[in-house]
Image (cartoon, helix red, strand yellow):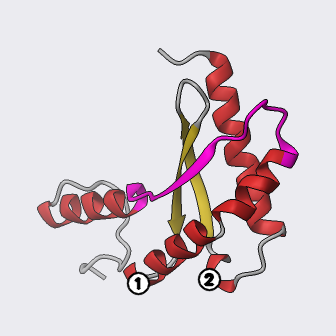
Amino acid sequence: MKGVRMERVQEEIRRELSEILRNRVRDPRLSWVSVMRVEVAQDLSVARVYVSALGDEATQEAALRVLVGARPFLRSELGRQLTLRRTPDLIFRADKGIEYSLRISKILHELGLSDGPTQGGSDDE
């Protein structure tokens, strides 16, 4: 079970990476990228960073490629901001959580099991 310290480290890495992407990275392909969550290995050697990019599949893949290319810069900036002995290596992954939620919501709506408002309004109007 992960301890409170591990959760704090993960949240701190998420917050700092978000800040770095928002204020220090000038690449327009990363302007709509959000850091959703971070999972750090027990020995703090590796951090899996789950990101979500606004746009279609090609836009998301391009943003992920840019992040992988910017990994050395992001890691060095992260190392300057954190008070860890060793800055973890960053592994970027696409977070499909929002996409999955929208798909489930659409399926529920099509089955008539949805309570909430629909995106396109109702057919009764």
Residue flagged by tag 2: what amino acid is it?
Arg
Residue at 61% x, 46% y is 89
Residue 75 in which image quadrant: bottom right
Q: Is residue 71 above or below residue 4?
A: below
Residue 110 in which image quadrant: bottom left
Rounded to the nearest whole Å, what is the CA distance between mark 2 and mark 1? 11 Å
In the image, the segment drawn in magenta is 80-98
- x%, y% of residue 106? 25, 66
- x%, y% of residue 82? 82, 39
* Helix, strand or loop under label 2: helix
Query: CB under 8 Å between callouts 2 and 1?
Result: no
Q: Is residue 5 left or right of residue 82?
A: left
* Helix, strand or loop under label 1: helix
The disc at residue 15 is none
Q: Is residue 94 magenta?
A: yes
- x%, y% of residue 98? 42, 59
Q: Is residue 60 above or below residue 5?
A: below
Label 1 belongs to which residue?
58
Residue at 51% x, 74% y is 65
Q: How many marks?
A: 2
Q: Is residue 97 left or right of residue 27?
A: left
Residue flagged by tag 1: what amino acid is it?
Ala
Label 2 belongs to which residue?
29
- x%, y% of residue 35? 61, 56
Instruction: Tell me which numbered mark, 2 or 1, is placed earlier along the sequence.
Output: 2
Residue at 65% x, 41% y is 88
Residue 106 or residue 79, whichever sits in front: 79
Residue at 56% x, 46% y is 37
Residue 113 in which image quadrant: bottom left
Residue 16 or residue 102, whichever sits in front: 16
Q: Is residue 36 left or right of residue 21?
A: left
